[in-house]
Amino acid sequence: HGDGEDGGEGEELVVEEHTCQFCGRHDENFTDENLDLHFWRDCPMLMTCTMCDQVVEISYFREHLLTECENAEAPAEAAQIAEGTCPLCAVAVPADDDGWTNHLLSDVCQKNPRPAIT
């Protein structure tokens, strides 16, 4: 466990076993398969792209539409989302990891179809 290769990023978080790397939820039932289900259905930090059905981080959704999404309409969809705002509710979110964590987990975005489990 502790000496895994994390891509060499000095600030990379070490994710504990049975813990979601996105929302930090710990569940002893989180096997690799159950974590995948959590990513697809439940994680409040993730969403399914409305254009291509790929699961992406909400904080990265606009960028996904501009650079990764295979749907030809994606750039036009991205233009509807102001930079630095939540793509779900349009509230301005501070441009740091804590900003997104607070918005999606603490303040609980009102438009998130995957509410945080408290």
Image (cartoon, rainbow, N blue to C red):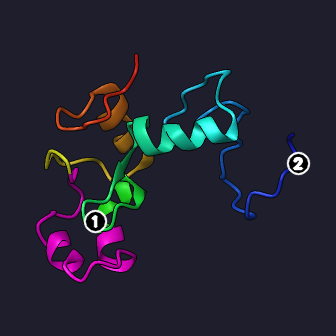
Local crowd size for mark 1, using a 10 Å CA cut-off: few (<14), some (14–19), many (≥20): many
Residue located at (29% from left, 48% from top): 94
Q: Principal SS element in the magenta part? A: loop
Say if the magenta span includes residue 74: yes
Residue 41: quarter of image: top left
Residue 39 x %, y %: 49, 43
Instruction: State which quarter of the image contains the N terminus.
Output: top right
Q: Is residue 9 left or right of residue 116?
A: right
- Answer whether labels 2 and 1 touch (C-beta < 8 Å): no
Say if the magenta span includes residue 102: no
Q: Amino acid at mark 1?
A: Arg
Q: Is residue 51 above or below residue 39?
A: below
Local crowd size for mark 2, using a 10 Å CA cut-off: few (<14), some (14–19), many (≥20): few
Q: SS for tag 2?
A: loop
Instruction: State which quarter of the image contains the C terminus.
Output: top left
Distance Cα–Cα, label 2 vs label 1: 34 Å
Furthest toward the bottom, the residue is 72
Residue located at (15% from left, 63% from top): 82
Query: For mark 1, what is the residue?
Result: 62
Q: Which residues are magenta?
A: 64-87
Residue located at (66% from left, 45% from top): 13
Residue 17 x %, y %: 73, 33
Q: Is residue 57 visible?
A: yes
Residue 4 x %, y %: 84, 51
Query: For mark 2, what is the residue?
Result: 3
**Tag 1 or tag 2, which sits nearer the N-term?**
2
Residue located at (71% from left, 57% from top): 10
Q: Amino acid at mark 2?
A: Asp
Q: Is residue 14 left or right of residue 44?
A: right
Q: Is residue 21 visible?
A: no
